[in-house]
Amino acid sequence: MQIDWWTLGLQTVNLLVLLWLLARFLFRPMAAMVARRQADTDRLLDSARAARDEAEAAKAAAVAARAAADAERAGIIAAAQKDAEAQREAILDKARQEAQAHIADAEDRIGRMQDDADARIGHRASVLATDIAARLLAQPGARLPLSAFLGGLVQALAGLPDAAREAIGAGDDAPVLVSARPLGEADLAACHAAIAEALGREVALKTEVDPDLIAGLRFTSASVEVNANLRDDLARILAGLDRHDR
């Protein structure tokens, strides 16, 4: 095989010229274009990264804001629940206090009603007992001598204050001597004498009869009443029973 060096040389020169032309008019513009495209790509990537970072920051801010809102809402709900619980407890406590007050008041009223009922029953029983005693004493009392009561009457009159004794019979109304049965002359004279001795002077007496006294005497004037009779004794016994029942 024979090599034509002139042809090879020309081809080499043509190749070099072609390469220069390509480098001058093709490779450099393409490299510049690629560089510009790369710069544009880098700028786009930077913008995308910046947008991504901004989006992530916004997302983080939104998450933080949502967390803060959730925490605030939870705090508000907790405070509202606590306030509602406190109000419920206050209402229940007030209701309990009012219920206890009503119960105590009802128990007090029931107790008073029971006490009143017991007192009324006791009083009625005592009245019945004294009425029975009065009936039982009617006949024995009629046989009691006047002297059994006259001493007590005189003692009570003598024990009055001086002013009270002096006022007896001093006015126009004469004092009244009430007896359970009509007085005979001897008994009436004994009464006049005993009363005059107790008062320190003679006084005019009116006489009346009241069988309800059962036995004994009652002396009354405008300002004084003195009892010495079985009816008064029974009344004092009844009053004592009532006080005992209370």
Image (cartoon, helix red, strand yellow):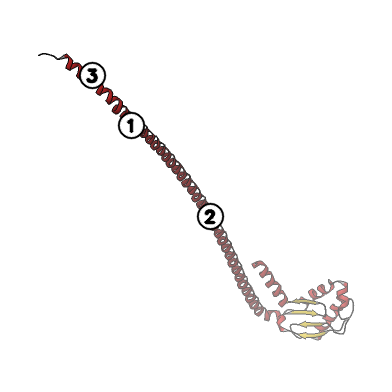
Closer to the eye: label 1 or 3: 3
The amino acid on which the numbered mark 3 sits, given as a three-letter code, is: Val
Q: Residue at x 84, y 78 (%)?
A: 195
Q: Quadrant of residue 148?
A: bottom right
Please state if 54 lies on the left or on the right of 22 as rendered. right
Q: Is residue 7 above or below residue 130?
A: above
Q: Is residue 32 above or below residue 140?
A: above
Q: Is residue 39 above or below residue 85?
A: above
Q: Which residue has dot 1 on it?
A: 33
Q: Position of residue 32 (x, y in %)?
A: 34, 29
Labelled disc at residue 13:
3
Q: Residue at x 70, y 79 (%)?
A: 141
Residue contact between numbered discs 2 and 1, judged by CB atoms under 8 Å: no
Residue contact between numbered discs 1 and 3, judged by CB atoms under 8 Å: no
Please, what secondary structure does the residue beneath circle 2 have?
helix
Q: Quadrant of residue 1?
A: top left
Question: Which of the image's four quarters has the C terminus?
Answer: bottom right
187 or 134: nearer the eye? 134
Q: Earlier in the sequence, mark 2 or mark 1?
A: 1
Rounded to the nearest angstrom, the CA distance separating label 2 from label 1 is 81 Å
Please, what secondary structure does the residue beneath circle 3 have?
helix
The amino acid on which the numbered mark 2 sits, given as a three-letter code, is: Glu
Rounded to the nearest angstrom, the CA distance separating label 1 from label 3 is 29 Å
Q: Which residue has dot 2 on it?
A: 89
Residue density around tag 1, few if under 14, some if 14–19, many if 20 or more, within 10 Å: few
Please, what secondary structure does the residue beneath circle 1 have?
helix
Q: Earlier in the sequence, mark 1 or mark 3?
A: 3
The amino acid on which the numbered mark 1 sits, given as a three-letter code, is: Met
Q: Earlier in the sequence, mark 2 or mark 3?
A: 3
Q: Position of residue 60 (x, y in %)?
A: 43, 40
